[in-house]
Image (cartoon, helix red, strand yellow):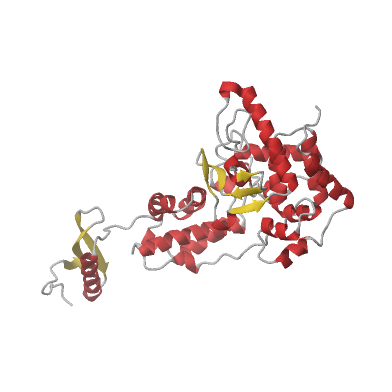
Amino acid sequence: MTGKRGNGEGSIYPYKNGYAAYVWVTKPDGKRARKYAYGKTREEVHDKWIRLHAEAKKGPVATSTPTLGAYLARWLKEVVEPDLKPKTAETYAMHVRLYLTPGLGAKRLDKLTVRDVRTWVNKLLDECQCCAQGKDARRDKPRCCAAGDCCGQIPSRRTVQDARAVLRSALTNAMTEELITKNVAGLVKVRSGRKAKRNPWSVEEARQFLEAARAVHDPLYPAYVLILVLGFRRGEVLGLTWENVDLETGEVSVQLQLQRIRRRLVHDETKTEASSATLPLPQICVTALQLRRKEQEAAKQAAGELWSDSDFVFTTRYGTPIEPRNFNRSFTDRSAKAGVRRIRLHDTRHTCGSLLAALDVHPRIAMQILRHSKIAVTMEVYTHVPSEATRKALRKLGKHLGRQDPA
């Protein structure tokens, strides 16, 4: 076939080892520019040229395709941050920063393949992140890969699954914007790893922890009661306000949480609607909150003008919110002083049901607190009860907590 152009095909022309074509389009920023198409034969380019004309008639057309890294940066700013909760947006940004941009960011968005994603996943499952993220290089004295002794900080399968899910979400949005036609991340699977076996405290250990904290007048004792007895999460207990506590009716409303996100404390609604609920307060929680109110009033008087007014139930001695990480440190330190096993703060939620049984909380009330849909599920907890001595000790804590013990 000769290189002669046909009628109406003035923008198709021989180019290198094939042909090229262009169409004038309006870009998303409103400016006019040429959009090019390439191919080995005139027929191939002509088909692409026709499709370009059709796109241009529908609306704005991007004239260049960004790299995955550039696209992810825009996606985070324009889609993720406005639409998702701050903590979720922060998590997405973390996966992009640590895993996606370093591993795939240089790839052009429309050239990303299933093989690229599979290769990235396989590498991530085997690569020490201490070295991959440059942590070792920033140390004064290398002690990992740079020293020939890898510390083995390899991401868990759950982490790799989450990073792949973030990529899939970003590419789904790219398809919506018609930047790509296929979501290659959705075609790559990551086998689930075994769930880590949790070994939460027994009721006896929880009782030992609470008694030790109460004996030394730990100001966070009432917070520990809410975490262990009601299953509060860290953000929920630190974000609790007096407005959501009714000691007369014995109810607490879980509506807000306190989290540190991007170097600032954020007091926002709970993650999901299911997390929000109005819960009945067992007596041990009522008396713990009564004690907390007295202690907070005393702290306010002692601080004087330095006191910062807020409605938070748990505050520092100056009325300011408690840092989430400081709360974790306090919990770990108190565990060690109480002589109980060190566990994750979040694992205390698994002791909640057994404690309710030990406190003789009625199964129907426990069902509300545990948020079970069937009473049969709650009753399974009540088949595992602690010793009578532990039951008496816990009831004693609930009965006498409101009294001020002598120093």
Q: Is residue 325 above or below residue 93?
A: above
Residue 115 left/right relative to 222: left
Residue 88 percent across, percent down from the top left? 51, 51
Name the foreground residue: 86 vs 210.
Answer: 210
On the rendered structure, is 109 left or right of 153? left
Q: Is residue 275 above or below residue 207?
A: below
Q: Position of residue 109 (x, y in %)?
A: 38, 59
Q: Is residue 118 visible?
A: yes
Of 36 and 199, the residue lying toward us: 199
Residue at screen point 33% across, 64% down: 178
Which image quarter: residue 32? bottom left
Which quarter of the rendered picture does the C terminus lie within? Answer: top right
Of residue 331 and residue 30, the one placed in the foreground of this image is: 331
Q: Residue at x 58, y 48 (%)?
A: 129
Task: Please tell me in which quadrant of the rendered image residue 174 appears.
Answer: bottom left
Relative to residue 340, is residue 320 drawn left or right?
left
The residue most toward the left is 7
Furthest-bottom residue in view? 1
Residue 334 is situated, as x and y percent measured from the top left of the image, at 75, 38
Q: Determine if residue 17 is in view.
A: no
Say whether residue 123 is left or right of residue 339.
left
Residue 375: x and y, percent? 71, 65
Q: Which picture quadrant has residue 71?
A: bottom left
Mark count: 0
Q: Look at the image and tell me in which quarter the N terminus lies.
A: bottom left
Q: Residue at x 55, y 37 (%)?
A: 138
